[in-house]
Image: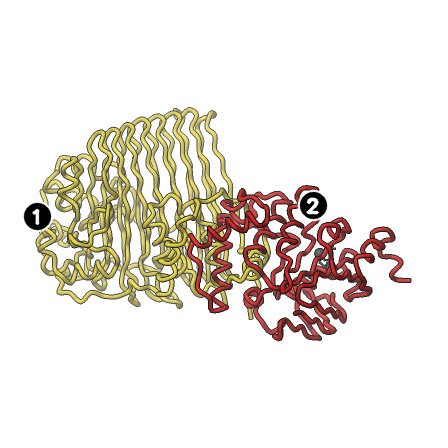
Amino acid sequence: MLKINDVYAKAGDKEILKGLSLEVKPGEVHAIMGPNGAGKSTLGNLLAGMPHVEATQGSVDFLGKDLLDLEPEERAAEGVFLAFQYPVEIPGVNNMYFLRTALNAQRKYRGEEPMDSAQFLRMVKQKIKDMNMRDDLLKRPVNVGFSGGEKKRNEVFQMGVLEPKLAILDETDSGLDIDALKIVSDGVNQLRSSDRSFIIITHYQRLLDHIEPDYVHVLADGKIVKSGTKKLALELEEQGYGWLNQ
Amino acid sequence: MKQKLEIKGGKKLLDGRDSSNADEENAVVKARAKQKYKEGFVTDIESYTLPPGLSEGTIRQISTFKNEPDWLLEYRLDAFRKWQQMEQPNWAKLNIPPIDFQAISYYSSPAANKENAPKSLEEVDPKLLETYDKLGVPLHERERLAGVAVDAVFDSVSVGTTFKAELEKVGVIFSSFSEAVHDHPELVKQYLGSVVPSSDNYFAALNAAVFSDGSFVYIPKGVRCPMELSTYFRINAINTGQFERTLIVADEGAYVSYLEGCTAPMRDENQLHAAVVELVAMDDAKIKYSTVQNWYPGDEEGKGGIYNFVTKRGNCLGKNSKISWTQVETGSAITWKYPSCILRGDNSSGEFYSVALTNNYQQADTGTKMIHLGKNTKSTVISKGISVGKSQNAYRGLVRVAKKADHARNFTQCDSLLIGKSCGAHTFPYTESANMTAKLEHEATTSKISEDQLNYCLQRGISEEDAISLIVDGFCKEVFKELPMEFAVEAKALLDISLEGAIG
Ligand SMILES: Nc1ncnc2c1ncn2[C@@H]1O[C@H](COP(=O)(O)OP(=O)(O)OP(=O)(O)O)[C@@H](O)[C@H]1O
Ligand SMILES: [Mg+2]
């Protein structure tokens, strides 16, 4: 599904990723942990094609396509979804309307018919049911005045509607209370399938109690310095990142 | 290469209207947005046009064409003399090239209408009907806009008014100004110039001297006007100024919603449009006045376009009266316009909702005056300025509270959105309060479309162009929701067209 090959990348003028490689197969869940400032969000931004991150070396293959060659909106339509660490507010733009605009833009790219508002509404209602969510945020402008937890829940809901092939969740668990954490991770688990992969960036092992990863990686100073299974996360939780340098 | 936009936090706006019908709207918007200035065509029609030049003789000619009573001719001549003593104002943040008032023609009428406005739509030249069809304002019986009565003004004359008979049944008078002068001279005489005196300002004086047509509305006591009334202004003839006059009187307890639309052909020369609109609201009356101004803005190099110098003012004469201005200004090379309210009646209220978008070399200096004279008067001002390209966009507002206006309240919110690096947004809010009990609130923000917002949209699969249109639409929500539905759709489409080329 995704193959990152020895990538170097700059955020702004600063070199952040320094020879990062990672392979994600269909259906796999990879957790990425690592100290603040290590480059985790930068990796997510690079994959999503955010303009301030630029690859200087290496390659990224996504389902047989050169990902770095695509515009960000094309990557979205190809199936890359990034749940942002800090989702932005778009005043005056209704959440439902935003989401349908996004979905139809992606469908158009893929040569599919647009969904009219009735079809869309039906689909959204079903999603809400499947994901065990509520519809309280849908009529409000995108993220405006949402609490931290509500913003994160909205990201996961958008993911559910857009049905990406690769979802990158950047600290989607941060700032969530226990109930919200359950709602969000239930949402993710509901979407897990054999042809959908996840990269989950987190600082906390507790999320991995809810969403069981196939692999855990430690990203430090711009590259993956250690990879392992779920057990690695437990070790990190106990010992921190210091021992990795020894 | 994508243009990088500076990141700056926007301000929170209130929740907009539910866009459940956004779909249908969007289809129309999309279709419209594909076209450029589609109103830029010229109707090839035989017309009668006065030679350029302005003198007492010109004014007498106009008055003769219109077969006007002596008092009106006197009114015009008086205004002309005042105008000759005045100077063109230069306090606005506008760069106005010198205007040669002798090079303009002050009267142009489709030949058939030379004498006066036609008596019925059946007599209207088919070419004119076609023009209005093309503009999306059908006048024929068959295809009329449902629930909207239209007065169509073509250059200097009204060419027809729809639904007149239906409106007369409930006592509503809706006619061209010229007709009203003949059919209801007492009303016209009583209110003409009562809100905007001919000495008010340079362009108002010019208008009072040479105005040729416009619309007249009278809603009798206690009547809620059963349909939206609208005037569609069209400039067609070359080198001609349009000077129309609108007068709306809502008697006690009456209600009317009035819409105004305007377009002109694309030409390299600038054309002058200097209108005056007067509104009068008696006790408990409400007037809602909406404008979608789409005069030709000039081309990308700033060549051509309409000079739109307009004086609009409403007088809340009666207790509990209310006047509400909503405007969406996307057109004109230069806009100079301050729809205002005089809040004379106790408990009266005034509102001003505005979206002004400037692109390329357009300039706009627009805003409002809220003059609080009565007790417990209330005013609300919501202004959204969007500057794109090399344009300059200024909000200029005055809130004045007179000594006797106890407990007057004003809320003003001016938001500016900048798209690109070479444009400018300016805010000039003035307040003058002579009463200690007044409560005036002012909020202002300037923001750029943030890179984060764009990125967020891109990541969800929305193209940059659509993202900007989405964000701008959200920015304008509070104003759009004040517009009648058909107008809101039109306004959205206009914004999208005007935003074209907003990013590199
Ligand atoms: N646009 C930018 N310009 C310059 N430096 C940047 C930019 N974006 C990120 N950085 C820097 O890159 C480094 C990595 O940032 P990144 O956000 O990827 O870290 P992170 O691993 O996600 O950290 P955290 O756990 O705190 O979220 C940081 O030092 C950050 O300041
Ligand atoms: Mg981060």
Residue at screen point 49% across, 50% down: A96
Element marked by disc 2: loop
CA gap between label 1 and label 2 equals 77 Å
* Amino acid at pointer 1: Asn
Instruction: Name the image colouring.
Output: by chain
- The chain carrying label 1 is B
Q: Residue at x 41, y 49 (%)?
A: B355
Residue B195, horizontal then vertical, whole percent: 27, 37
Q: Image quadrant of ligand 1?
A: bottom right
Answer whether residue B78 is visible to the viewer in this image. yes
Q: Quadrant of the N terminus of chain A?
A: bottom right
> Closer to the observer: label 1 or label 2?
2
Q: For mark 1, what is the residue?
A: B67
Give percent across and percent down for residue A131.
59, 49
Callout 1: SS:
loop
What percent of the width, then of the height, locates residue B69?
A: 9, 42
Rendered residue at 59%/44% (across/down):
A146
Q: Could you tell me residue B301's position as x and y percent?
A: 39, 68
Relative vertical location of residue B207 with respect to residue A6 in this rendering, above or below = above
Q: Which chain is red?
A: A
Q: Which amino acid type is shown beneath numbered disc 2?
A: Gly
Nearer-the-camera pick, B401 or B36: B36
Q: Residues within 10 Å of mark 2 (few under 14, many from 20)?
A: some
Location of mark 2 (residue)? A175
Chain B, hue in figure = yellow
Q: Which chain does the residue under circle 2 lie in? A: A
* Number of residue marks: 2
